[in-house]
Image: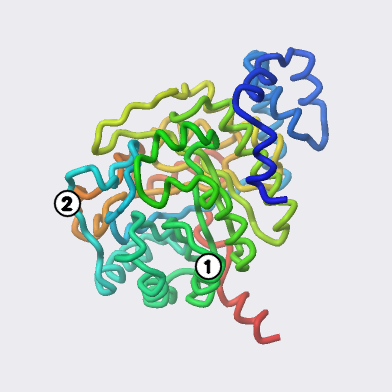
């Protein structure tokens, strides 16, 4: 059974009714459990769980230290292009927006990569808009081959591919995939995606499965917070993570928590997520998924990111720029969205250490794969 088939059993009104029916006793039972299930996640995301946030936070902290120690992996996004053929209402790269378009050459990509390398990064995420005809698999593979000697790990956040496409990426030295479903509500998904291939809800939903089948070492998922109700989206994200961890147990799984930020087009969140609900979501997913990496980006403010460190976060971006070429030439006119935490990587690193954690620049090396292949 694919995750698409599984999701058919969890329509939004039914899930929301189950969440709202949960009681304090249900929350206490979930907090006392050792290995949680989907039913427990319903309780932890419910309004009834809000008085228990401190207990949830303390348990989330204990679990994270047990599984990950006090390590925070630092990474940076490297935007290759903002060209896009989709009409996503919430995105600054939308084809509807009259913004300057730019695609970096291989030389420019290497220049950007060297800036990040010199800042200490060894884990990067290559990001593009979705324009496969302009930015095809060959382009992405060439970019990865050009810069892979600079980094220990290269992941991609680009258009969804078939399994064979991800196998090409693995051969080029890419070991990770980030793909956000944006919303797990099919009706809302159709409203948010006016045109383009991204309108295909089922194809996008199955992308992590194709990436896992291709042998990618890391897969990251998440929903775009602010589109649908965070409780429903959080439940489906947790359900998706459980499914992937069972079917692709050799793959390292991460969950991200991107909240909508200001971008060209002026889209406003349909269901704004407060900081308190943001904390509830992070803690609930940490309790459900004790061995899954939780990722926090520079979309969030410096103060909030600092305070969220003990609650289950294991990876953070730093010094991010969401415009192609923005690290080297400082031109941010082509950015996807505005970041909030604009501290330098060195400043973020110092803060992490001041909070009693260790900033980790490298926790993997592609040489491991090469050695395994040679055995």
Tell me if residue 23 comes above or below residue 216 in the rendering. Answer: above
Report if the CB atoms under discs 1 and 2 are less than 8 Å apart.
no
- According to the picture, the residue beneath numbered tag 1 turns out to be 166
> How many numbered circles are shown?
2
Query: x%, y% of residue 238?
Result: 65, 38
The residue that appears at 36% across and 60% down in the rendered structure is 119
Residue at the extreme bottom: 374
Query: x%, y% of residue 10?
Result: 66, 32
- According to the picture, the residue beneath numbered tag 2 turns out to be 100
The mark nearer the N terminus, 1 or 2, is: 2
User: Which SS class for mark 1?
Assistant: helix
**Residue 1 appears in the figure:** yes
User: On the rendered structure, is 375 left or right of 319?
Assistant: right
**Image quarter (top left, top right, bottom left or bottom right) of the C terminus:** bottom right
Query: x%, y% of residue 285?
Result: 64, 35
User: Which SS class for mark 2?
Assistant: loop
């Amino acid at each position: 059974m694919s995750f698409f088939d599984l999701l058919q059993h969890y329509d939004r009104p039914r899930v929301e009714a189950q969440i709202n029916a949960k009681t304090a006793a249900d929350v206490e039972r979930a907090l006392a459990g050792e290995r949680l299930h989907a039913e427990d996640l319903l309780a932890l995301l419910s309004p009834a769980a809000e008085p228990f946030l401190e207990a949830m936070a303390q348990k989330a902290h204990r679990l994270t230290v047990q599984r990950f120690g006090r390590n925070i992996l630092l990474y940076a996004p490297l935007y290759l292009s903002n060209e896009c053929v989709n009409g996503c209402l919430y995105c600054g790269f939308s084809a509807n927006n009259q913004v300057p378009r730019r695609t970096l050459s291989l030389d420019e990509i290497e220049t950007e990569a060297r800036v990040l390398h010199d800042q200490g990064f060894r884990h990067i995420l290559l990001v593009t808009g979705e324009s496969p005809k302009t930015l095809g698999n060959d382009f992405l593979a060439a970019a990865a081959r050009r810069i892979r000697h600079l980094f220990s790990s290269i992941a991609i956040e680009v258009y969804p591919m078939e399994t064979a496409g991800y196998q090409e990426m693995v051969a080029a030295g890419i070991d990770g995939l980030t793909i956000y479903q944006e919303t797990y509500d099919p009706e809302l998904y159709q409203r948010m995606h006016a045109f383009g291939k991204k309108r295909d809800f089922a194809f996008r939903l199955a992308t992590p499965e194709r990436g896992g089948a291709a042998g990618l070492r890391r897969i990251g998922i998440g929903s775009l917070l602010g589109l649908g109700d965070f409780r429903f989206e959080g439940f489906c994200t947790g359900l998706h993570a459980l499914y992937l961890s069972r079917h692709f147990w050799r793959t390292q799984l991460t969950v991200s928590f991107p909240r909508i930020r200001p971008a060209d087009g002026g889209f406003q969140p349909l269901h704004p997520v407060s900081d308190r609900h943001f904390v509830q979501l992070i803690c609930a997913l940490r309790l459900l998924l004790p061995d899954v990496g939780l990722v926090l980006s520079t979309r969030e403010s410096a103060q909030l990111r600092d305070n969220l460190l003990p609650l289950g976060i294991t990876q953070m971006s730093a010094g991010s720029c969401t415009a192609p070429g923005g690290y080297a030439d400082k031109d941010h006119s082509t950015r996807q969205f505005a970041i909030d935490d604009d501290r330098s990587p060195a400043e973020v690193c110092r803060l992490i250490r001041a909070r009693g954690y260790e900033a980790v620049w490298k926790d993997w090396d592609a040489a491991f794969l090469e050695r395994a292949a040679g055995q």
